[in-house]
Image (tube, grey):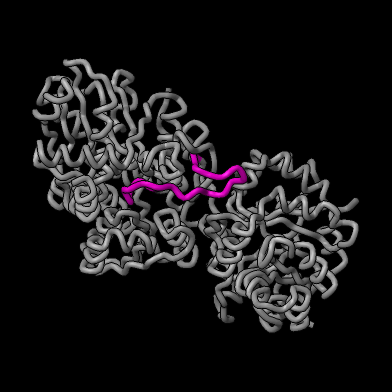
Amino acid sequence: MNYQSNDKGYYGTFGGAFIPEMMQQNISQLQSCYLQIIESDSFKDEFKKLLSDYAGRPSPLYYSDRLSDRYQAHIYLKREDLNHTGSHKINNTIGQILLAKRLGKTRIIAETGAGQHGVATATVCARAGLECIVYMGAVDVARQSPNVEKMKMLGAEVRAVNSGSKTLKDATNEAIRDWINNPVDTHYIIGSVVGPHPYPDMVARFQSVISEEIRIQLKEKTGRETPDYVIACVGGGSNAAGAFYHFLDNPEVQLIAVEAGGKGVDTGESAATTQLGRPGILHGSRSLLMQTADGQVIEPYSISAGLDYPGIGPMHANLFLTKRGRFLSATDEEALKAALYLSQKEGIIPALESAHALAALEMIEFKPEDVVVVNVSGRGDKDMETFLKYFQSVK
Amino acid sequence: MENRITSLFKRKERNILSIYFTAGYPALKDTLTIIKELEKNGADLIEIGMPFSDPVADGPVIQHSSEIALENGMTINLLFEQLKEIRKTVSIPLILMGYLNPVMQYGVEEFCTKCHETGIDGTIIPDLPLEVYEEEYKAIFEKHLLSNIFLITPQTPEERIIKIDSLSTGFIYMVSSSSTTGVKESENNEQISYFERIQTMNLRSGRLIGFGISDKSSFLRACNYANGAIIGSAFVTGMAGDSKIEDKVSAFMQKFF
């Protein structure tokens, strides 16, 4: 079984490029040249150098004594939270800014939910000297204000989006509209493995450094390259795509994707797309989508602004359909508890998104010899307000 | 019976006036009234918008009308219900315009069947790309005598325009500039050279220019370079306000004659 996309960007029946004619030229250009550019030696050298000297890679693979003890297995944390800008998002934005430069683009746009991708984009734009405009739902601007201030300090313009439900989905719509209105000078840095082909594959490739490093680090530490489990949270799914990438063809490695259950999958306030969605088209690709009976997109809910997306990347939809991936969901409450536990037992405050992956440790029966890697995709600084509110409420 | 779009372009070569409105806006029950009044007031062709929650090719005016229409309860099902007897009174060509996801959920085959039964002559589905249409849907559309209308933009390369021309059975929708709907365009040299470039291609299909056409002068200017033009956002804007819907339609249309 092949879990990668074909040359038209299809993962099984998911993916493709369902775009209006107004985007056709930019997308065709990317489709025809992205592989040639990102596989070239000069690109690879520059990318690798920036990942190490600028972003601080490789990120450590840390053996957690306390989690291993509690869950009775060998539990490793992939520390993407230690990257520059505080999450895995920087891997993709470094790759895409190098691509944009080679395409001769002078203006960068991006969408952001929690603001991590916005900050990572503003960061690479500052370094590259390119104009940067970040679209962010008005609701997210309010609940993630530290990241808004960071983007501004980095020289980006943050445009609050007031259309629709004023969150990530609408920020993405608005970024697409910007690109339609500025087709010549602008490159759109999509932050997840979503969007029309070639974005899902391109972003997955840039994020694949995560699993590339896990293999090497695990070999050094345990003598084996493959773990029994890789666990990652999924909104659109970029950190999971990166953490799974080099294990897709190792069927002995269980790939666990953890969606945001919100207040509970059946409460109507959830973002568990594989459980609540069905095939549909949004933002340029065919995938699983939360929608009404007549095809209107449903606004999802999660306490974590990075996971409340009504779709899921087409690669993940295919992993779900083929059962190569196992999809679980963690509620707000479960994620908050997991975040608190890691903070107090290991001294690591994880992002609320990553806390969903940690919460899944409670749901799996491990054997004592199992080697488990949890991708800690980001750090929790941006979520302090949410954490504090929760701790006050449970006191 | 010949497709009404084909007949229209045979009968009228210049100054074809096409009007877009969002079904379910301003009120759910306005659909039939708007269509009838448009025909009465001289529209040659009508594009009926099927609202979608995430209309990425549209500017603020049509986004807003779509949002209200959905709040009002518009669905494809209900729209077909409203249009059931439309051909007893209206004879100009009617086109359904909307995004692919709601059509897919309705079922493409069933959608086309229903269009044909209702007397719909064509469709505009901006996020249904040429290649996917050709591979997966062309046969179904043709079977139900539906013309699927494709867009071209100033960025569309010549060989792609030729391909679109060969696949078109209705007309080609020329997007006047690189933009979402409702962005007002002032005349500029770049735009005119695009219009002229297309004009000299001697395409077999008729052409209507849309996006940014808002009044009589921009309409007539566009008509110099194509068989006619499409007005969307400006008409939708004109439907707001408290007066009777009939009066709003005729007041808007009178500006063109």
- Residues A391 and A5: in front is A391
Left or right: residue B172 compared with residue A195:
right
Q: Nearer the viewer, residue A304 or A374?
A: A304
- Residue B48, percent from left and from top: 71, 60
Residue in the image at 59% along x and 49% along y: B129
Looking at the rendering, the stretch of residues picked out in magenta corresponds to A287-308
Please report the residue visible at 33 percent of the width from the left and 51 percent of the height from the top. Answer: A305
Quadrant hosting residue A250: top left
Q: Position of residue A341 (x, y in %)?
A: 16, 37
Look at the image and tell me whether residue B159 can be seen: no
Query: In the figure, is residue A248 to the left or right of B7?
Result: left
Where is residue B238? Give x, y as percent: 67, 76
Which quadrant of the figure contains the C terminus of chain B?
Answer: bottom right
Task: Give the mark count.
Answer: 0
- Residue at horizontal 56 percent and vertical 66 percent from the top: B64
A33 drawn magenta? no
Q: Position of residue B194 (x, y in %)?
A: 60, 71
As drawn, B108 above or below B44: above
Say which of B239 and B204 sits in front.
B239
Q: Is residue A351 visible in the rendered structure shown here?
A: yes
Q: Main secondary structure of the magenta part?
A: loop
Q: Does the magenta portion include A295?
A: yes
Residue under the point 43% across and 22% down: A1
Q: Quadrant of residue A224?
A: top left
